[in-house]
Image (spheres, rainbow, N blue to C red):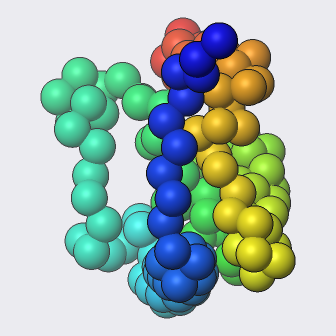
Amino acid sequence: MESHRIHLQLPMALHYGVAALLWLGLLFFLGALWRFDPEESSLYPSCYLLQSTGLKCGGCGVLRATHALLHGEWRLALQQHPLWVGALPLCLFCLFWHTVAVVRGKPWRVVEFFWAHPSILLVCGVAAFLFAFLRNVL
């Protein structure tokens, strides 16, 4: 039986480069977010949905919550975006997992992982939808 999966063979140097760029980009972004408060700076984009309808999208508050976390203000971060505060450790773990796989010479195949475990994506999608809906209703 023929497999329907797409297998991309990329050189390991590209995997190393991507992992290094992800970490450097994350550090640069977090440094800027630590330095410039989203409440006071015009550096960050504003939410078009919030401006036009008054409804908060699923991402409204992520920057403010991350800024609060970087300054150790957990309670404020939970008020800004509780789903993000809960999902952030999982996101960092996935990035760390990918980096370890690359260093060991076995690139982590994100697409194949989620292809084999679609229930993870379904649960995340339903949670994000419910969060976005309930934050506007309550």
Q: Residue 104: horizontal and vertical position, in percent?
A: 82, 77
Depth check: 105 or 95 in front? 105
Can residue 90 be seen here? The reply is yes
* Drawn side of residue 87 relative to residue 34, left or right: right
Against 26, residue 136 (above or below) is above
Residue sitting at x 26%, y 58%: 45
Against 103, residue 85 (above or below) is above
Q: Quadrant of the C terminus?
A: top right
Q: Quadrant of the N terminus?
A: top right
Depth check: 51 or 20 in front? 20
Residue at the far front: name it: 1
Q: Residue 28: horizontal and vertical position, in percent?
A: 48, 87
Residue sitting at x 75%, y 75%: 105
Q: Residue 133: horizontal and vertical position, in percent?
A: 53, 14
Can residue 79 be seen here? The reply is no
Depth check: 61 or 116 in front? 116
* Drawn side of residue 11 relative to residue 45, left or right: right
Depth check: 69 or 86 in front? 86
Quadrant for residue 122, please give it.
top right
Count numbered badges in the picture. 0
Against 125, residue 62 (above or below) is below
Residue sitting at x 75%, y 66%: 106
Q: Residue 118: horizontal and vertical position, in percent?
A: 69, 20
Residue sitting at x 49%, y 66%: 10
Quadrant for residue 137, please give it.
top right
